[in-house]
Amino acid sequence: MFFKSFFLLVAFSLWVSVTFSQNQMLCERKVALIFKAFNEKNIGTIESMYANDFTFSGKEGALAKRIVSALLTQATTSVSSYQLMSAKLNTNLELIYEVMYDKLGKKTARFVFDANEALKEMELFKIEVKTLDSASTIQLPDANVIKIPFQKVGRLIGVEAVVNGEKRLFIVDNGAPKLILNKHYFKSKESAGQRIQADVPKGVNGSIQNLDIVQLETFDFYGVQLNHQPVLSIDLSHLEKELKTPIYGLIGYEVYKTFDLLFDYPNKTLTLLKPAHSLMYVNETTNSKAMRILPLELNAHLACVKGKIGDIDVHLAIDCGAESNLLSDSLFSIVKPHVSAIKTETLIGADNATRLVKKGKINRLQLGTLTFKKCNTTFSTISHLNAGYKINLDGLIGFDVLSRQKTLLSYTNKQIWFIP
């Protein structure tokens, strides 16, 4: 009896040892794939490994996954070599690695896998995670109508705002989700190092690099105010160089989302209207009888409209921060019969990345019953926009359409008004 019990105990111990060895080998292969994905910036490989309760850098769930995605986007280093230093099995399997990064040097990485070999925890190296955990606090003026003069900066809308007591030039960009300051003028007071921002806006060429979060003292845009709170900042020096003027930031959707926006490029005015007063104001100041109204849908912060190029349906976002219209490069071969004056140029996006793109004129863009002819259009990748905001866009409508008439954009009523 004693011998039989002893034999079973030994057999059970051997089974545990073999199972642990098998699991460890599988998890080591997964770690190798993670390092490879890190170097290739392939988030899909890592996402397929997550446990339901995955944590990263002390954050859990969806936020943890966004941080890893941001890390792959923003990291400028890569893994040169790695070596397993220890393996520890309790309820979970913990693997500790010594990793050599080409720009960071030697670091310790930690991976924890659960009983199903799913990735439960991960630390590639020590980082400082910075997030904007809530919407900005915005103070609104009492005025029903705020008429704002602007200057054309290239084909963009340049306006003055008072930031930290100084009057400065900003770009109105409803393609940006928030107020974003130019990092060149607004520095983080915190120590430098490995900082990762989880909430990363998407630029024309991809996720915006070199992002930070800084403390704003005061901001006043014709009575719309943000005071004493953290805001995003990026390096806009490439935009300043291209436009040959200092740009202190981008005024994005969150600042004016409760207003209707009336764009009047010929008279260089942007009018903010409380939605209840928009129709009266338009009736009094324009030929409203010829006005065309189209429905919008909101995807994240983007106001989107349906259109046609020939018999091809397209789903487009309104973006006053786009100097030309933009279509996905995946559509180029499909709509090419409807495009003239095709050429190849270099595009510099908000992330300061450059790429060769096709440009041309869409012969006829149909929005509802309105036809826009000879629309200057750039063809570039927008997969990052769709993935980042979980939408399905075909492109953006920018200056070339918005400037041809007065245009009112209403987030509240989900409408766009074209006013001849």
Image (tube, rainbow, N blue to C red):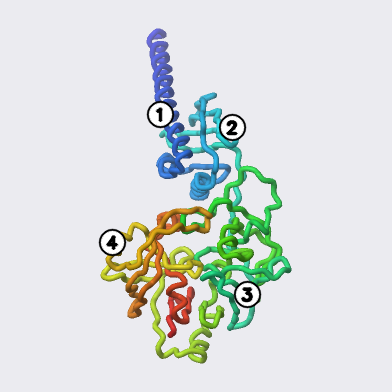
| Residues at marks 2 and 1, CA–CA distance in whole angstroms | 23 Å
Above or below, comparing residue 300 to residue 366 in the picture: above
Kindly give the residue lying farthest to the right in the view shown. Answer: 165
In-front residue for pair 188/406? 406
Residue neighbourhood size for the residue with mark 4, other residues' Cα within 10 Å, grouped as few (<14), some (14–19), many (≥20): few
Q: Secondary structure at mark 4?
A: helix
Q: Which residue corresponds to mark 2?
A: 107
Residue neighbourhood size for the residue with mark 2, other residues' Cα within 10 Å, grouped as few (<14), some (14–19), many (≥20): some
| Residues at marks 3 and 2, CA–CA distance in whole angstroms | 48 Å
Q: Are marks 3 and 1 in contact (CB under 8 Å)?
A: no
Q: Secondary structure at mark 2?
A: strand
Q: What number is the disc on residue 60?
A: none
| Left or right, residue 62 beside residue 127 | left
Q: Tell me the kind of residue under disc 4.
A: Ile
Q: Which residue corresponds to mark 1?
A: 26
Which comes before the other along the chain, label 4 or label 1? 1
Which comes before the other along the chain, label 3 or label 4? 3
Q: Tell me the kind of residue under disc 1.
A: Leu
Which quarter of the rendered picture does the N terminus lie within?
top left
Q: Determine if residue 279 is in view.
A: yes
Q: Which residue corresponds to mark 4?
A: 334
Q: Secondary structure at mark 3?
A: loop
Q: Secondary structure at mark 1?
A: helix
Q: Tell me the kind of residue under disc 2.
A: Lys
| Front of the two marks 4 and 2 | 4
